[in-house]
Image (cartoon, rainbow, N blue to C red):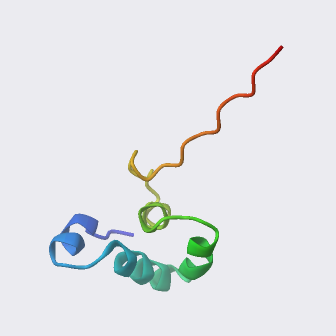
C-alpha cells in the first residue's frame, strides 16, 4: 500500500488519524492493537510493511544474569 505518511503529517493529520485510516483500509483492528500496548507509529509501520522508527521500537528485555 502506497501512503505518504510524511505528507499526511505535514498536512496536519495526527499519527492516530493516520493509523485509524490505514487500519480501516486494511480491515485491521487499530483499537485492539492500541489496547494491547502498540503505539500509533508501530501500527502504521505494521500496516505499511515497514519497520517502526527506532524511537517507536520497543526496548528488548535485558538478558537474565547467569550464575
Residue 53, image x and y in percent? 38, 50
Q: Residue lying farthest left?
A: 11
Whether residue 59 sits left or right of residue 54 in the image: it is right
From the viewer's side, name the closer residue of 24 and 37.
Answer: 37
**Which residue is rendered at x = 34% and y = 72% of the image?**
15
Total label count? Answer: 0
Q: Quadrant of the N terminus?
A: bottom left
- Asked if residue 60 is positioned above or below residue 46 in the image, the reply reads above
Q: Is residue 43 left or right of residue 32?
A: left
Quick one: quadrant of the C terminus? Answer: top right
Residue 45 vertical position relative to residue 19 in the rendered view, above or below? above
Residue extending farthest to the top is 67
Could you say where residue 3 lies in the image, as x and y percent from the top left? 31, 70
Residue at 59 percent across and 72 percent down: it is: 33
Q: Nearer the viewer, residue 27 or 43?
A: 43
In this rendering, the answer to whether 7 lies above or below 50 is below
Amino acid at each position: 500500500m502506497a501512503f505518504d505518511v510524511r505528507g499526511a503529517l505535514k498536512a496536519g493529520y495526527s499519527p492516530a488519524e493516520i493509523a485509524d485510516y490505514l487500519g480501516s483500509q486494511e480491515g485491521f483492528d487499530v483499537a485492539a492493537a492500541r489496547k494491547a500496548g502498540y503505539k500509533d507509529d508501530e501500527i502504521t509501520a505494521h500496516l505499511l510493511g515497514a519497520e517502526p522508527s527506532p524511537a517507536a521500537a520497543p526496548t528488548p528485555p535485558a538478558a537474565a544474569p547467569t550464575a
